[in-house]
Amino acid sequence: MKQRKNRTDSTSEMVKSKSNTVVAVPQGIDLTTEEERILWRQFTSARSNWRDFDLLQIGKMVKIEIEIRQIQSIIAEQGFIVENAKGVNVQNPLIAVEDTKQRMQLAIIGKLSLGVSAKNAIALNNSGKKAESEIFNNLKKKDVASLLAH
């Protein structure tokens, strides 16, 4: 029996090709630890075409992720509630710092469209616009008063 040839568009082949591709770190970004290099490979494997500016943002995300992990470790040691200088139990202030770091990271993810799973983000946006216009057109045909709470 003839053995089937591996398809280049299969998921397993895509994973193999992505795992072999390492995006070069641009000047100005120093990845000093193995953990940073692993995160770099994970973040940059999201797609194959990167602009230098995008890679600088990925470098920031790597550093932010390392800081988030360090903060989470400290919070795990200290607990969510700590005693302030006056002896009053308060929420650990590092929780707010962690939240801010996570928001920064999510903003970068959004700007780089790393959460988009479609191959073509434009097509994904167009389908959303089409659905929105259909809803709007249906609303225009109906009595607006039926939408109001009674």
Image (cartoon, grey):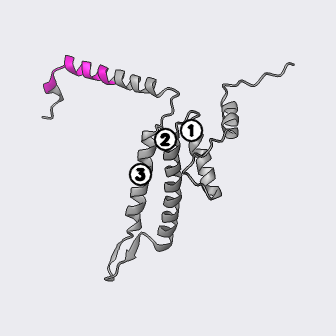
- Identity of the residue furthest to the front in this view: 27
Q: Nearer the viewer, mark 2 or mark 3?
A: 2
The region drawn magenta spans 132-145
Q: Is residue 12 left or right of residue 118?
A: right
Q: Earlier in the sequence, mark 2 or mark 3?
A: 2
Front one among 12 and 94: 94
Q: Which residue is mark 1?
A: 46
Q: CA distance from mark 1 to mark 2?
A: 16 Å
92 over 128 or under it: above or below: below
Among numbered discs 1 and 2, the one appearing first in the sequence:
1
Residue 137 magenta-drawn?
Answer: yes
Query: x%, y% of residue 132?
Result: 32, 25
- In which quadrant of the rendered image does the C terminus lie? top left
Residue hosting label 3: 104
Q: Residue at x 70, y 36 (%)?
A: 16
User: In the figure, is residue 150 to the left or right of 71?
Assistant: left
Comparing marks 1 and 2, which lies closer to the viewer? 2
Label 2 belongs to which residue? 53
Q: Distance between the Cα atoms at labels 2 and 3?
A: 16 Å
Residue 2's quadrant in the figure?
top right
Residue 101, position in %: x, y? Answer: 43, 56
Question: Dot 1 lies on which element?
Answer: loop
Tell me the residue at 62%/58% (across/down). Answer: 32
Seen as rendered, the residue at the extreme right is 1
Image-quadrant location for residue 18: top right
User: Measured from the top left, where is residue 55 in percent x and y?
Assistant: 53, 43
Q: Amino acid at mark 2?
A: Phe
Give the side of residue 26 with respect to residue 53, left or right. Answer: right
Tell whether 20 sits left or right of 140.
Answer: right
Identified by mark 1, the residue type is: Ala
